[in-house]
Structure formats: C-alpha cells, structure tokens
Amino acid sequence: MSENSANGVSRFAVELGVAALTGGFGAAVCYGSLDIGAGWTEMGPDAGYFPFYIGLLIVFGSLVNIVQAFLKHRGTEEIFMDAGRAKVVASFLLPLTAFGAVSAWLGLYVGTALYIAATMLFQGRYKWWIALPAGLGVSLVFFVVFEIGFQVPLLKGPVEAWFGIY
Amino acid sequence: MKKSVSIACMIAAALGVAAPAAAFEPNRPVEFVVTAGPGGGTDIFARTIQAIIAKYELMKSPVVVTNKGSAGGAEGFVYTAGYKGDAHKLAFGTNNAYLLPVRAKVPYKAEDLTPVAALASDEFVLWVNGKADYATAADFVAKAKEGGLKIGGSQSKDVDQILTSMINDATGAKISYIPFKSGGEAAVQLAGEHIDANVNNPSENLGQWQADMVKPLCVFKSVKLSSEAKVAGDKGWGDIPTCKEAGIPIDNYSMPRTVWLPGGVEPDVVQFYADVLRKVSETPEWAKYLADTSQSPVYLSGEELKSAVEVDGAAVSEVLKREGWLAN
Amino acid sequence: MENIGLLIDGFGHILSWNHILLMMVGVTLGILVGVLPGLGAPNGVSLLLPLTFSMDPISAIILLSCMYWGALFGGSTTSILFNIPGEPSSVATTFDGYPMAKGGQPSRALTLAFVSAGLGALAGVVMITLLSGWVAKFALKFSSPEYFAVYFLAFASFISMGAQSPFKTLVSMMLGFALASIGMDTISGNLRLTFDIPELIKGVSFLIAVMGLFGIGELLLTSEEGLRFEGIKARVKLAEIGRTLIEIPRYWLTIARSTIIGIWMGITPAGPTAASFMSYGVARRSARDKSLFGKGDPRGIVAPETADHSAGTSALLPMLALGVPGSATAAVMMGGLMIWGLTPGPMLFTDRPDFVWGLIASMYLGNVVAVFLVIATVPLYASILRVPFSIIGPIIVAVIFSGAYQVANSVSDIFLVIGFGLLGYVFKKLDYPLAPLVLAMVLGDKAEDAFRQSMLMSGGSLNIFWSNGLVSGLMALGLVLLLSPLAFWLIGTLRRRRHDVAPHGDGNAAA
C-alpha cells in the first residue's frame, strides 16, 4: 500500500517492517525460553524466566511501535529512501555482501584483495594498475600484521593452500 | 563454514593418502584450541606446553593458540570436532571434554574427539574462611548437616558442583551450591565470608591462604599431596589431611588436564602428538609448572587414557543422573 | 604515608632506559591492537605472554601493562575517527567523539580523548598508591547482591538519556538483553535460545554487534550521503592540539566526577565498559545545556574516556590485592604472574613489594609515555581521513571483517556483522536508539547472573537486596536515578500546563 516506485520506500512501510521483525524476534525469544523453563522456582528464577519476559516486552514494544507508525507516519509523504539513494547504498552494500560470501569460500586474504581492488576500480574509477596493487597490498599488510606479527590466523582458503600457506 | 570444513577434510584426506608409510609429522601450523578464556587454568596449561615445545623444538611446525572458551568450553570442542580427520587441530581441556555432552545439549559427542593424552591432574581441596571455627572437615560436615551452608564454585553442573553433590551424598549434608564464573570469584567470595566454603583447586586459593583469609580443611585424594614446600607460613600442601581421614568419605576426586584431536584421525597422528606431549611432560619446565600450580604429575595416553576417561566419565555420570542433570 | 616511600622505591626499580624502551614498545603494540577491532587488549597481552617467560617479572609486567594502556588509547581512536569502537570500553566515546570529528575537528576530539584518558588513568594510579589497603578490604564486602546493585545503578544512570520514543528505546534495550542471554547460562549450565544452531552456542559476541551496528551501519549511512566522508577534511594544525590542551581545564568538574565513577566501577569491579557508559550518562544528565550531546559535545568525550581509563587502571588493584581480575586483560596478566612464579593475592604486597610498587610506578610512567606517543600520532590519524572514501571505506570494511572473524575464528560472524550493520543503519534512520541495546548487551548477562546468584543465596527472597547498608544504599541511589527523570518530567509538564505554554515539544529536555 505504501510501495511507491517513483519515490522509493515510504518510512511508514519500513517502520512497519522493522516493528514486525523485532516482534517476530521477541516471539522467538519467548518460544525458546518456554523450552527451558520460564518459571520462578523456590531457588529464584529459572533459566528462561528473564528471557521470557524480555521476549514479551519486545513483542509489546513492537506492537506499540506498529500502532505509532499508523498514527505518526501513515499517509505522510515521508520517504525512507528514494530510488537514487537506494542505488547508492546498494552499490556499497552489495559488494560488501559479496565480499563476505567470497571470503567464506576463498578466505579473507583473497576476499580482501578482490574487494578492495574491485571497489577502487568500479567505484573509485581508478586505473587497474593502481587498484590491483592496492588490493594486494592491503591483503599483504593484513598478512604481515595478523599472521606474522600477532600470530592470529585469518580465514584461509584453497588459494593459500596452493602456495603452501595454511 | 561448511565449505572450509570440507576443504580441511580434503586436505586431510590428501595427506593420509600421500604419506601412509612415513611417520606423521605436521607440515603446517598446528592450532591449539584452548577451551577456556585467556588467563584460566586451561589457558596456562596450553600456553606452557606451547612454550616448552618451542624451547625444545619438539615440533617443526609453528603452534598457534586460540581461545574458544564460551559455553563452558563447548565452543572449542564443537570447533575441534568439526574438523573431522584434521591432524592439525588440538583441543586442550579438562574432563569437561566428555562431561559437557552428558549434561548439556551441546552439538558434539564425546566420540567426535580422539583422546591424545592427559598431562596433569588438578586436585580439589575443601576450603573455609580463615576465621571460621571449623578445625576439621568433620566439624564442617556436622554443621552442614543442619543445612543452610553454601559452597560456591566455578560454573554450573561442572566439577565443583558435582563434588558438592558427592559430599552431600556421602555425608548426608545439605549444602547448597552457588555457581560463579570462575574459581577466582569463588575464592574472593569465600574470603569475604559471603559463602561458607569452596572446593577450589590449590592454585586458585593459594593467595588467600597465604594471607590467612581462607584455610584448607582437607584434600580429595587418597594420599596427602606430595609437595614439601611450606607455601603458607609454616604450612604446606603436604600438611593438608586427606578428606577420607578427616571425615568425608570421598576417596579420590581430581580433574585431569587433557588434550584431544578431532575424531577420525590416523593412529600415527595420535601417536605423534602423544609422543611430543610425553617429551613435554619430562622437561624440568613442566615439573616447575606443576609445582607452581600445585598439580599432580600424570601422564596417560593410548588405552590407559581411554579406560581412565571411561571410569571417570561413568563415575561422574552417575552423580549427574542422581541429580537429574542429564541432558538427554 | 608509608606508601609514598614504597612508591619512590618502586621508581628506583624501574627507572632505566631498558624499561622506558619496553614501555614504548608495549604502548605502541597496544595502540595497534586497540585500533584493530578484532584484536582486544586481552588477545594482545596473551600473545606477548610467552615472550615474557624469559624476562624478569618487573620487565614483563611493564611490557604487558603498557600494552594494556596502549590498547585502551588505541580503542578510542577508531571510535572517534570511524565510529568503530576498537575496544568495548570505547563505545561511549563514539556518541560525541565521532560527531565532533565529522564536524571537522578530528584533532580536537582525539586530543580531548587522549588527555582526559591520561588524566583518568593517573587518577586511578594515585588512588591505588594511596588507598590500596583500604580499597582491597572494601572490595571484599562485595557479593552478588552488591554486584547486581552496581549494575542496576549503571543502568539507571544511563537509561533515561534522550529517547525520542520510549517504546523504541524499550525494544532496543530488550533486544540487547535477549542477545546477551543467547548461549550458555552460567547459573543452570544449560544452553539457552540457541535453537540447536551450532554457531549460536558461543553466544552473540558484543564486539560483533558493536562492529556491525556502529561500524558497518555508519559506513552505510555515509555511503548514502554519496560515498564520501562529509566534512572531515580539516587539516591538522599543531595549534589545534595546543588549543585543545588549554581548553581541558574547563571540564574539571566532568573529569573529577568521571574519575570517581571510573575508580568506583573499576574496583567494584563492574569494569571499564560499564564505567564509561555510566559516566557519559551522568555527564549528560548533569549538564545544564544538553542540546550538544550526541552532536559533538566535548564533555561527551571527556566523560567516558576519563572513566574508562580510571576504571582500567583501578581494575588492576583487585588483581594485585585480592587475586581477582577486574577485567579480562587483568585475568591474562594474572595468569602471567603465576607463570613468573608470583602468587597474585593479598600477600603479594608484603612478599614482593619491589614487584608491586615497580608495577605501580610503571603505571605512572607508562601512562605519561602513552599520552605523548598517542598525541604524536594524531596528525597521522587525522590525515587518514583525507583519503577518498572509495579507498578508505573498503579498507575499513576489510578491517571490520577480519576483526569479526578473529573474535571467534568463525565465518558465521562475518555474516552476523553484516546483519547487525543493516540493523544499525535502519535503526538509526528510524530513530531507534542504539546505546541502550549496547549497554544491555554488556551488562545484561552479568546483571542476571548476579541476580540469580543472590536468589540462590537468599533462597528466593528479594529482601537480600535490602539486607545491609551497602546494598541498600546502592539500590536506593539506583532507584532515585531511575525515577528522577520521570519526576522532573512530571513536574515540568504540570508547570507548563499551568503556564499554558509549551516551548519545548519533547518532554525530555526538562532538568
């Protein structure tokens, strides 16, 4: 009802969506707490006692927020995000998510190098011979600092294994 | 997550195929997974071994220590068990390795881990406040039978609470148990007279003992501790009577410090690490570590270790069952 | 004044070029550890621990404790420059530090933070020097009910701050509590709210939440503004650092109050994170003009930083005097003490005065060294901000991701951080406050543990929270702090009604 393709997403819709999301989370918390006992025993509260009421409060707060969304934001022309901005945010968010996915597969070093090179290349509009070494450089600095300096391993994938680095 | 596990399996499989004849030797960094937070007993245990291995060059590959102590150590065991067949992950823990799956719904089973060695055994001592008027453990038990006494300890349904339950069962006392995050907290709560006793390991209460804030009543061991040194004034560990002679009929209760590999590793891998750890246990540095932390020297591996794990696991499971703490 | 003499002896033990060099190395490493969000001071200190096995205990503790100071300073840097708290205790610094930096005064924000942090730390050490014996005895009085009362007090002093919608605040705070209760429950030893998902048994790390909510969330907001840091283009002028130094005495009241809060929270021991939140809350409440808070008020930087560092230093006292670590880092150092053959505990002061007073003396020197080193890096940091967003943005993301992974070596945390980033972004745009969520995550499980331990002690009776003067006093103070805004608000509304004018639309401004 409030999806307006010309102007983007209305604040009302997002308010509702977020409140529904938090409400759902609250319900899940209640459900999970009942599983482990949400009563008050003679030795004080059970493991699920506090979480259960916390869940209830989340549900309650979310319901009020839904009502307030209807009162405050319905019918107003307030826009959460217009199409142009959505595109800009997506252009940051999507590579970031891809970075996460690639890292889970190829490891963080490869992911970092690719991500930084790609964003510099496509968003920063740098030349490839600047972007590529920059990506590799950052990755290398990470390697030296974490792996060698602090001996904290970062996630590695098949590419490192290829070079005999585990 | 799944991806990296499967990759690890592939690598492990490849290694297994490539070098069946030659004895196993790690060819990449070995990860020591500490199933406790930084600074805890298990952490010092693993880091001491790391330092000794480095000093005597017992292994060619470097060692990386990571702390995974959440959920009473379950985080580290789940992580290690997830690397099935990986010869480069060692988990460091206590008997919590095989106790956790019995008492809590954790996503791993004791069979998902391969025991490598037990290197030390931490003792349990019954401590009361320094100003308390109990002279012996029998006095304490007499008072405890009236009810209302509180023992504080580290974690819930873990070694300290199990021992408390065993004391209640053996003597007919009605002591309640209050779980804290660590033995250190339980030590201070006792020094501040907020609880009536704790069953801390010797090293956890040494500082307070030296200041006369707490005093030991008895040690849960069949013989007295062997250390001669007078650590607190004119008293030493060897002067503490055994609980059995002092009035609590519990013969032996101790906590092994254990090392585990993931399940599904080759026997020669287990043998390799068992050998390395045996060499560690024979160094003077190790003897010093045991003396500093007042633990008893033990070295178990192979079948010996397996049967010890079974015996200990069965004994403790019985207590868990009696208290209704079984998870499944 | 026996302690002063001992302190002078302590200085005698540590004054050598070797030790000063160790301090500089420690502080520098610490700053690095602090700046990287995944590596905290506890990690850093435990990594250096094996190196110290061959050192004498005094050199070893100098190296480790200076690393700790460095990490505390480093954590504030990223809070101010990128809205990413490098350490949990510097979350509160982002509230005003980042807006000030964004408003074009990064050097001022950093200098304010560093100097007030240094002052806080020094105050903490002075307290240790003068009051060590008394404080140690006092800390022994604390048991679970008192801990609960302290956490309650910290909550009460913070909670009423600037919420536009009370129900959004409620939801945000309760989300924090719920997140904190995921994982293993200390009191029952059972897993809670894990829904049989293996990744959840370790719980949801506070650091992951903070990196996502603040770090990624802020980057998303920035990207919306057109993929560049708006405003932070100011040149660093040495004069600005100097001007800020002159400005500091003006905040003497905030500094004094924050120091007391910090020391109190450090020894009780609720820790630096709670201290910084509480101090921020109190500073905001007691300010006559609140309009600048959240938008770059200098007091909003000075208050949490002073409290953070005075709590950080005071937290070492329970470790030395009682053998209880007041913070995670102190726990690691305590492990170190044992390995060096020292027994942390009440006898350490008598048995090894050279070590204890050497450490205390090194705290004076180490913090001074740290302030100088860290101020020297201000121009460097501030120049980072002139790098175009298309380069620095992705680098920050990469640092956050690697940090998220390092928290628990878990890939799922990388995706969790993205999730929290989205949440932070949407919450910020819809005026859900983030601070209550964060505070609830920090204190929630501790407060619950303390509450339930108290219930076990009392056999389920709530009277335990009024059972002695100390706990009653703390609870009463907490209740007053919690209810006073409501009372002021009521009085304010009534008065406004009577005058029949409503100059301020939202009732929160009443003081």
Image: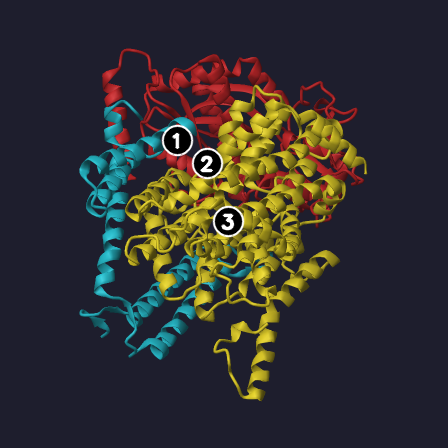
Chain colours: A cyan, B red, C yellow
Tag 1 and tag 2, C-beta contact below 8 Å: yes
Q: Quadrant of the N terminus of chain C?
A: top right
Q: Mark number for residue C32?
A: 2
Q: Residue at x 52, y 55 (%)?
A: C444
Residue C301 percent coordinates (x, y): 53, 54
Q: Residue at x 45, y 71 (%)?
A: C165
Dot 3: within a 10 Å radius of its alpha carbon, few (fewer than 14), some, or many (20 or more) residues? some
Which element type, helix, strand or loop, lies under badge 1?
helix
Compare residues A71 and B317 and report the one nearer the observer. A71
A117 in relation to B234, above or below? below
Which element type, helix, strand or loop, lies under badge 2?
helix
Q: Residue furthest top?
A: B22
Q: Earlier in the sequence, mark 2 or mark 3?
A: 2
Dot 2: within a 10 Å radius of its alpha carbon, few (fewer than 14), some, or many (20 or more) residues? many
B181 in relation to C461, above or below? above
> Disc 2 and disc 3: Cα gap in Å?
24 Å
Q: Residue at x 54, y 66 (%)?
A: C290
Compare residues B165 and C208 and report the one nearer the observer. C208
Circle 1 sits on which residue? Answer: A145
Give, as a three-letter code, the residue at label 1: Val
> Disc 1 and disc 2: Cα gap in Å?
9 Å
Respond whether the residues carrying marks 2 and 3 are from the same subunit.
yes
Compare residues B291 and C175 and report the one nearer the observer. C175
Circle 3 sits on which residue? Answer: C240
Looking at the image, can residue C196 be seen?
yes
Tag 1 and tag 3, C-beta contact below 8 Å: no
Give, as a three-letter code, the residue at label 2: Leu
Residue C57 percent coordinates (x, y): 63, 24
